[in-house]
Image (cartoon, rainbow, N blue to C red):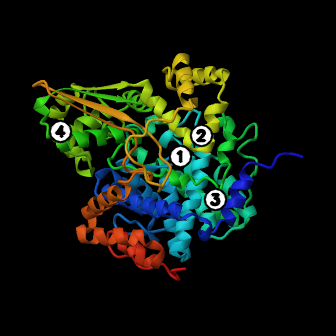
């Protein structure tokens, strides 16, 4: 008997799962992600670069409608509102991640817009957020070893938006399968030149979100898609993966992707968050002026180093500190933090970077970023805490490593790892010895480790060092709620003031107790009109 197409179990689970089936800690993570992404949208709502998306859609007749742009309070058509909100949250790279991928843009802003359009309840909204994360995250994980990675996986927003919309439309499993397949029929392949420097980056999630929302409505109207589109010999995995891992789609309802949620506490690449936390802790115990710094050494993972190296071809003139360079160049991120004593939306503004450009360039010359294989091994070893991650590590063979090394070399123009490095990483990852745990963990989530160690050597001979393994925004961190509160209040205060920002935080943490229109009004830049028929349950 032929194997069941891999898309069908995803659709079956998505259509069947109910709010009461979702564990409390996963629902808590969904509330946190909802608030976090609303904060990310507010943080950049006044940035010059996002105005092109707003004005462009208005020129196309996209103003007015039944969905809310949270950063401005304006109203727009469903797909337009979702696109603008996602563009806002993309602008400063102030989003969040799950295992594996930046599912957040589609997982939050597609269902938020559709829920307003359809008059859904806040309980339905939260369920759709969970569904989008579970489907999008698994597709990303199945394609982890491929030509795209991280935010370049824009295709996850196709299935995330389609799955969330299908859930809110109450489509059955057959029609949901068609919605997912339609969304993947022409998947987005992100090109790095369009993401790493120009403001076209803002559309990386927005464009596929609109396609995913439309796919579910088309499926409801009778359009069909191919159920074998993932595994077909001319299908998705053939184009988007060097070594497909279909088993990453398994364990729906057993392992919850959203439990791995990690919130960014600084704008920029997720791989940089622990280094910036280490700097913050150093400066908290010993204030240091830039003039006192002899050299700053950042030991970090291969992933952080590769992001910095790869971005170097796109982020502008050597030494120039731009918003994109801060996002993707770890040395630039650390430089800005050391210069300003903090790193948030204000420091990301182009005018601020231009004004302080000379000082930043001088300081950046004293910041050294280097790879520590032991820290990279910590990332891989941490994957053992996730069943599918453990299986992936166990199933990769030496022959696979050779193929991957060659394909990554062809794609990225560099040697991502040597065979010796790869063998050493696998040996460490498969070790039965318990990995190092720096600090206590909570039982609120599954930890994803991306360690960094920062050493600051001073001109007078002093030395400060700090290592951070787990981002403080991880759901497994005891500091996650405090981190979320700080981000939400600071970001929303920029547009609605601190008092309303704190009310929005309270609303988000108790979202299921509110009507949808009431919640949207609480978290938007100005009061939005409640969606027709919006209810609490």
Mark 1: give few (<14), some (14-19) or many (20+) Cα within 10 Å: many
Q: Which disc, if any, is residue 215?
A: 3
Give the Cα separation between the discs numbered 2 and 3. 30 Å
Q: Is residue 267 visible?
A: yes
Which circle, 2 or 3, is nearer the viewer? 2
Name the element at disc 1: loop
Residue position marked by numbered label 4 in the rendering: 339
Q: Which disc, if any, is residue 99?
A: 1
Quarter holding the C terminus? bottom right
Give the Cα separation between the discs numbered 4 and 2. 39 Å
The reply to whether discs 4 and 2 touch (Cβ–Cβ < 8 Å) is no
Q: Is residue 213 visible?
A: no
Name the element at disc 3: helix
As displayed, is residue 102 above or below residue 22? above
Residue sitting nearer the eye, 482 or 498:
482
Q: Earlier in the sequence, mark 4 or mark 2?
A: 4
As displayed, is residue 273 above or below residue 317? below
Residue position marked by numbered label 2 in the rendering: 389
Which circle, 3 or 1, is nearer the viewer? 1
Which circle, 3 or 4, is nearer the viewer? 4
The reply to whether discs 2 and 3 touch (Cβ–Cβ < 8 Å) is no
The reply to whether discs 2 and 1 touch (Cβ–Cβ < 8 Å) is yes
Residue sitting nearer the eye, 320 or 276:
276
């Amino acid at each position: 008997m032929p194997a069941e197409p891999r898309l069908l179990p995803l659709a079956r689970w998505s259509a069947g799962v109910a709010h009461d089936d979702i564990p409390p800690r996963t629902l808590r993570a969904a509330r946190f992600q909802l608030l976090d992404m609303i904060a990310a949208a507010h943080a950049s709502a006044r940035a010059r670069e996002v105005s092109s998306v707003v004005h462009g859609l208005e020129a196309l007749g996209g103003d007015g409608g039944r969905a809310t742009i949270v950063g401005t309070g304006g109203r727009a058509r469903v797909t337009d509102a979702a696109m603008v909100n996602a563009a806002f949250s993309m602008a400063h790279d102030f989003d969040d991640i799950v295992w594996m991928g930046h599912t957040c843009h589609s997982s939050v802003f597609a269902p938020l817009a559709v829920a307003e359009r359809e008059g859904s309840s806040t309980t339905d909204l939260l369920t759709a957020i969970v569904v989008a994360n579970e489907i999008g995250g698994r597709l990303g994980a199945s394609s982890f070893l491929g030509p795209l990675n991280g935010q370049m996986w824009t295709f996850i927003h196709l299935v995330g938006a389609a799955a969330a919309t299908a859930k809110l439309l109450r489509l059955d499993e057959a029609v949901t399968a068609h919605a997912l397949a339609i969304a993947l029929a022409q998947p987005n392949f992100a090109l790095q030149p369009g993401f790493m420097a120009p403001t076209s980056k803002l559309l990386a999630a927005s464009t596929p979100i609109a396609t995913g929302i439309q796919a579910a409505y088309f499926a409801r109207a009778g359009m069909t898609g191919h159920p074998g589109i993932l595994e077909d010999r001319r299908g998705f995995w053939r184009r988007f993966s060097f070594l497909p891992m279909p088993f990453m789609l398994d364990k729906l309802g057993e392992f919850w992707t959203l439990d791995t949620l990690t919130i960014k506490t600084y704008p920029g690449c997720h791989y940089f968050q622990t280094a910036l936390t280490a700097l913050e802790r150093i400066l908290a115990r010993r204030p240091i002026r830039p003039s006192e710094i002899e050299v700053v050494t950042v030991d970090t993972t291969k992933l952080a180093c590769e992001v910095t190296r790869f971005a170097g071809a796109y982020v502008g003139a050597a030494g120039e500190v731009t918003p994109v360079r801060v996002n993707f160049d770890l040395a630039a991120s650390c430089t800005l933090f050391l210069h300003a004593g903090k790193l948030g939306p204000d420091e990301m503004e182009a005018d601020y970077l231009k004004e302080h450009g000379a000082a930043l360039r001088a300081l950046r010359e004293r910041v050294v970023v280097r790879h520590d294989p032991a820290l990279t091994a910590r990332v891989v070893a941490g994957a053992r805490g996730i069943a599918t991650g453990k299986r992936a590590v166990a199933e990769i063979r030496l022959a696979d490593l050779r193929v991957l090394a060659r394909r990554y070399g062809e794609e990225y123009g560099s040697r991502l790892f040597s065979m010796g490095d790869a063998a050493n990483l696998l040996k460490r990852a498969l070790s039965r010895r318990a990995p190092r745990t720096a600090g206590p963990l909570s039982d609120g989530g599954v930890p994803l480790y991306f360690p960094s160690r920062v050493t600051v050597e001073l001109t007078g001979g002093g030395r400060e060092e700090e290592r951070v393994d787990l981002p403080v925004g991880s759901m497994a961190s005891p500091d996650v709620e405090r981190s979320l509160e700080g981000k939400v209040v600071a970001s929303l205060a920029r547009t609605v003031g601190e008092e309303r920002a704190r009310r929005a935080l309270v609303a988000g943490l108790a979202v299921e107790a509110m009507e949808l229109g009431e919640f949207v009004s609480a978290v938007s830049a100005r009061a939005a009109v409640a969606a027709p028929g919006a209810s609490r349950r």
